[in-house]
Image: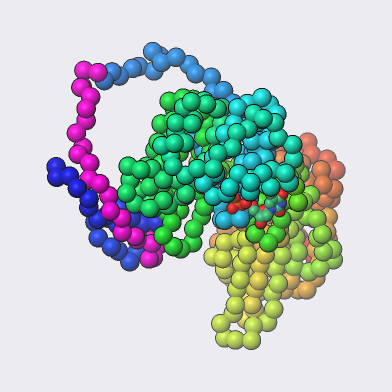
């Protein structure tokens, strides 16, 4: 195979590789994400002999207990019960969302737990890190800082110091000399992640990699390395609101739909241990179009306020806006209400919002959406001690959802008096007391609760 540099085009969003430029990426369907990079063509010849390679049966392999370290409680929960030794973890999110803050806080907790840590920053000077650290609190000398972007040098430091945990902030600033393209390019980001992966597995060190989510420009996004790492965490939230949600989208050592809730304070991120209370704080009472519903994220039920505002449309085409909830789901539910309950919603604009800025995809909030829309349409408030959940189908049937008992228990805990839920789920709840249970099988049998 001929050696030398060749032009390759990469999608900055997902890392798709092509020999020619394309307007739309065939893999992730994003537009205008292709960039040209010159890469060294390597010969694909392997240097190892086939006789050196051995296969094993499952029983021959020793059991390894997955040793876990713990840092911040919410963080550990999202990771499935602690940080697994020797894993590579990607922490992604928009710039300024709190990735560096969260990881520095984790370092603080772990340094007090007598673990050896190394924080490598390619973005900030040591003095800038110190300023941030001063806001967060007391650190011990178990944490070493390094401001460096050259991965060969960083690798040397890691191999020599052998820390338990390393944080690399951020992968887009790191550079490996063997790759000619600029830091942040797809081939650079891939190569540096690869080196970090080998370090993590080889030395049994846990490495956290920070990846900025980029909307445009020439910097590769964290999705490019999702498939290479063990665990992918994303920090979400509105930059201008104080809460932050930590979600895992891939986890080789635990379930994925767990989430952790944090609040950004003057002294770093603080865990929100009871998100239901937090999400419902400041709720308007006696306002039409508002209802509390319950969504399950991972193993934890969370109560949310859902709001709808339905007003007469001034144009032929009604306007619909959805925040925190799937837009198509709103249209679907409105069509069901129009057809099954005869509500003339096609003449009405509708604005739907989940307060707190959180995004929910679970169909269990359908029934909440239905009640919020009806309440706003009739301009009559729903009693504020009522909660509801259930999936709504196209014939207006209310379908069962999982973990009904946990949802109802969460509602009882927060003082709700009545719960409207799918009729089929009522049987599971015979031991629940202190709350009135109302089962519904179809929207046409919806009790008159307004
Ligand atoms: P940062 O962790 O630097 O974001 P990222 O690494 O994801 O780019 O967070 C920066 C924001 O957080 C910044 O706007 C200031 C805010 N912040 C606080 O509100 N309180 C704090 O204690 C700290 C350290 C940061
Ligand atoms: Mg940062």
Q: Is residue 379 above or below residue 362?
A: below
What segment is highlighted magenta in the picture?
27-52
> Is residue 251 or residue 4 the one in the foreground?
4
Measured as percent of width and height from the top left, residue 227 is found at 42, 42
On the picture, is 198 further left or further right than 281? left
Residue 374 lies in quadrant:
bottom right
> Is residue 375 or residue 307 the one in the foreground?
307
Measured as percent of width and height from the top left, residue 449 is found at 79, 62
Q: Is residue 126 above or below residue 53?
A: below
- The colour scheme used to paint the residues is rainbow
> Is residue 101 or residue 53 the one in the foreground?
101
Q: Is residue 261 above or below residue 290?
A: above
Residue farthest to the left, as pictured: 1
On the picture, is 433 further left or further right than 9? right
Residue 294 visible within the image: no
Residue 39 lies in the magenta stretch: yes
Measured as percent of width and height from the top left, residue 335 is found at 58, 70
On the picture, is 255 further left or further right than 309? left
Q: Is residue 314 above or below residue 42?
A: below
Residue 366 lies in the magenta stretch: no
Query: Which residue occupies 60% across, 73% down?
Result: 320
Q: How many marks?
A: 0
Query: Which residue occupies 64% across, 46% down?
Result: 127
Residue 291 lies in quadrant:
bottom right
Q: What quarter of the picture does the N terminus occupy?
A: top left
Query: Which residue occupies 34% across, 61% down?
Result: 34
> Is residue 425 or residue 46 the one in the foreground?
46
On the picture, is 122 further left or further right than 1? right
Residue 413 visible within the image: yes
Query: Which residue occupies 61% across, 67% down?
Result: 322
Measured as percent of width and height from the top left, residue 84 is found at 55, 29
């Amino acid at each position: 195979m001929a050696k030398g540099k060749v032009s390759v085009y990469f999608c900055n969003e997902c890392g798709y590789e092509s020999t020619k430029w394309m307007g739309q990426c065939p893999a992730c369907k994003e537009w205008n994400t292709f960039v040209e990079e010159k890469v060294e063509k390597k010969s694909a010849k392997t240097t190892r002999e086939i006789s050196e390679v051995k296969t094993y049966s499952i029983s021959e392999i020793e059991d390894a207990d997955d040793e876990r370290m713990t840092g911040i409680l919410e963080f550990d929960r999202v990771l499935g019960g602690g940080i697994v030794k020797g894993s590579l973890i990607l922490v992604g999110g928009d710039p300024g969302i709190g990735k560096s803050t969260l990881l520095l806080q984790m370092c603080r907790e772990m340094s007090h737990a007598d673990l050896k840590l190394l924080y490598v920053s390619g973005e900030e000077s040591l003095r800038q890190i110190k300023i941030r650290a001063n806001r967060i609190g007391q650190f011990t000398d178990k944490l070493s800082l390094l401001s460096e972007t050259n991965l060969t040098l960083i690798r040397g430091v890691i191999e020599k110091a052998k820390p338990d945990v390393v944080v690399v902030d951020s992968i887009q600033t790191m550079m490996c000399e063997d790759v000619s393209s600029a830091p942040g390019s797809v081939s650079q980001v891939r190569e540096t992640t690869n080196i970090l992966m080998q370090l993590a597995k080889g030395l049994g060190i846990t490495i956290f990699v920070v990846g900025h989510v980029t909307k445009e420009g020439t910097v590769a996004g964290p999705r490019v390395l999702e498939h290479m790492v063990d665990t992918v965490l994303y920090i979400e939230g509105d930059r201008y609101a104080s809460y932050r949600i930590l979600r895992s989208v891939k986890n080789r050592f635990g379930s994925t739909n767990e989430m952790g809730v944090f609040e950004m304070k003057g002294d770093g991120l603080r865990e929100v241990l009871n998100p239901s209370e937090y999400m419902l704080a400041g709720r308007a009472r006696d306002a039409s179009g508002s209802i509390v519903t319950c969504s399950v994220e991972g193993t934890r039920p969370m109560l949310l306020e859902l709001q709808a505002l339905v007003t007469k449309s001034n144009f032929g085409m009604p306007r619909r806006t959805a925040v925190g909830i799937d837009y198509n789901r709103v249209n679907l539910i409105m069509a069901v209400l129009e057809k099954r309950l005869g509500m003339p919603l096609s003449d009405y604009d509708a604005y739907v919002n989940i307060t707190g800025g959180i995004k929910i995809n679970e169909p269990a909030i359908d029934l909440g959406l239905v009640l919020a829309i009806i309440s706003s349409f009739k301009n009559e408030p729903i009693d504020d001690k009522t909660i509801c959940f259930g999936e709504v189908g196209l014939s207006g049937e209310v379908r069962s959802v999982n973990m009904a008992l946990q949802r109802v228990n969460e509602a009882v805990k927060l003082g709700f008096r009545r719960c409207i839920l799918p009729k089929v789920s009522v049987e599971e709840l015979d031991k629940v007391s202190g709350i009135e249970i109302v089962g519904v099988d179809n929207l046409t049998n919806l009790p008159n609760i307004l």
